């Protein structure tokens, strides 16, 4: 499953699976760079470039893999001065690595495809709370949709009640001759005694084009350029966010 260019670092089986014959086992890898890592509409590298890569195993209808990306998260720290009369606001940046683990089943029958799987999203140095989700997808020719219910595994507590946040992420993608459009929507649900709704339900859309650079019949690398528009509620800002992203990736076969 090649996630290197997906702002999807959701895993959509309908668009990512490489189904091989029932008796075949295939192990592939990928490595790449993006000018900005945007995950489902949200900036995960604070406007900076990110290095990414992964490994994928396909065996008939079964798939499993791991995917990594550098991440950087901006945070605001408020500090009272000694007189307690004023507050200094300092912008800091936490850096770490996103480590995704995923597995599932999928298949293609004629023009139709489907996938059922699960993904764990982990982050080093507690940059972001880890979360898990189920991945349900279906597709027909150039159109694919997915429903991804998930849950953040938060360590935060309020009155000794652990605060876990659940969500359902919906996505639809249309792709024709390298051009594609994706619409995604986060439906958040604060649970287990949370004092307020800290994140509002919101969406984004992405438009882009991707292809392979080939010289003398040799595939050098894949490239992709995309534009992402994110609703202001998604990024917790007063204004919406527009991001132009360019990326390259190299795919290689390890076992075939």
Image: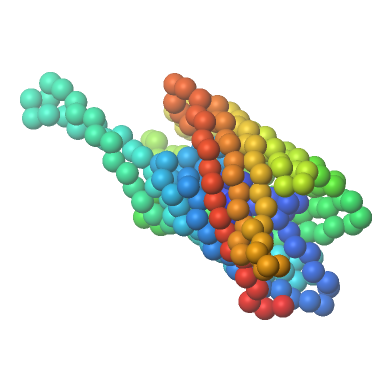
Residue placed most toward the observer, 69 or 221:
221
Q: Quadrant of the N terminus?
A: bottom right
Image point (67%, 78%), residue name = 255
> Residue 124: image x %, image y %?
41, 57
Image point (38%, 35%), residue name = 159
> Residue 53: image x %, image y %?
53, 62
Q: Quadrant of the C terminus?
A: bottom right
Q: Is residue 99 left or right of residue 205?
A: left
> Residue 21: image x %, image y %?
83, 72
> Residue 248: image x %, image y %?
56, 55
Image point (82%, 59%), residue name = 107
Image point (28%, 36%), residue name = 91
Q: Is residue 100 above or below residue 45?
A: below
Number of callouts in the render? 0
Q: Is residue 1 above or below residue 228?
A: below
Residue 29 location, quadrant: bottom right
Residue 200 visible, this orientation:
no
Q: Is residue 123 above or below residue 160?
A: below
Residue 159 visible, this orientation:
yes
């Amino acid at each position: 499953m090649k996630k290197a260019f997906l702002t999807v670092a959701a895993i959509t089986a309908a668009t990512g699976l490489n189904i091989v014959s029932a008796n075949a086992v295939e192990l592939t890898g990928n490595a790449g760079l993006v000018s900005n890592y945007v995950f489902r509409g949200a900036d995960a590298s604070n406007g900076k470039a990110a290095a990414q890569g992964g490994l994928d195993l396909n065996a008939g209808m079964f798939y499993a893999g791991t995917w990594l990306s550098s991440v950087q998260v901006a945070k605001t720290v408020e500090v009272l001065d000694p007189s307690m009369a004023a507050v200094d606001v300092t912008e800091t940046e936490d850096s770490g690595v996103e480590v995704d683990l995923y597995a599932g089943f999928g298949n293609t029958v004629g023009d139709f495809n489907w996938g059922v799987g699960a993904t764990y999203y982990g982050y080093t140095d507690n940059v972001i709370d880890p979360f898990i989700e189920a991945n349900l997808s279906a597709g027909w020719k150039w159109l694919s949709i997915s429903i991804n219910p998930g849950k953040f595994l938060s360590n935060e507590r309020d009155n000794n009640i652990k605060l876990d946040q659940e969500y359902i992420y919906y996505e639809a993608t249309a792709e024709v001759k390298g051009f594609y459009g994706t619409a995604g929507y986060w439906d958040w649900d604060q649970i287990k005694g949370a004092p307020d709704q800290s994140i509002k339900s919101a969406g984004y859309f992405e438009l882009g084009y991707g292809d392979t650079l080939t010289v003398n019949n040799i595939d050098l690398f894949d490239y992709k350029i995309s534009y992402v528009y994110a609703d202001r509620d998604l990024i917790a800002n007063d204004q919406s966010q527009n991001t132009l992203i360019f990326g390259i990736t190299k795919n290689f076969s390890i076992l075939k």
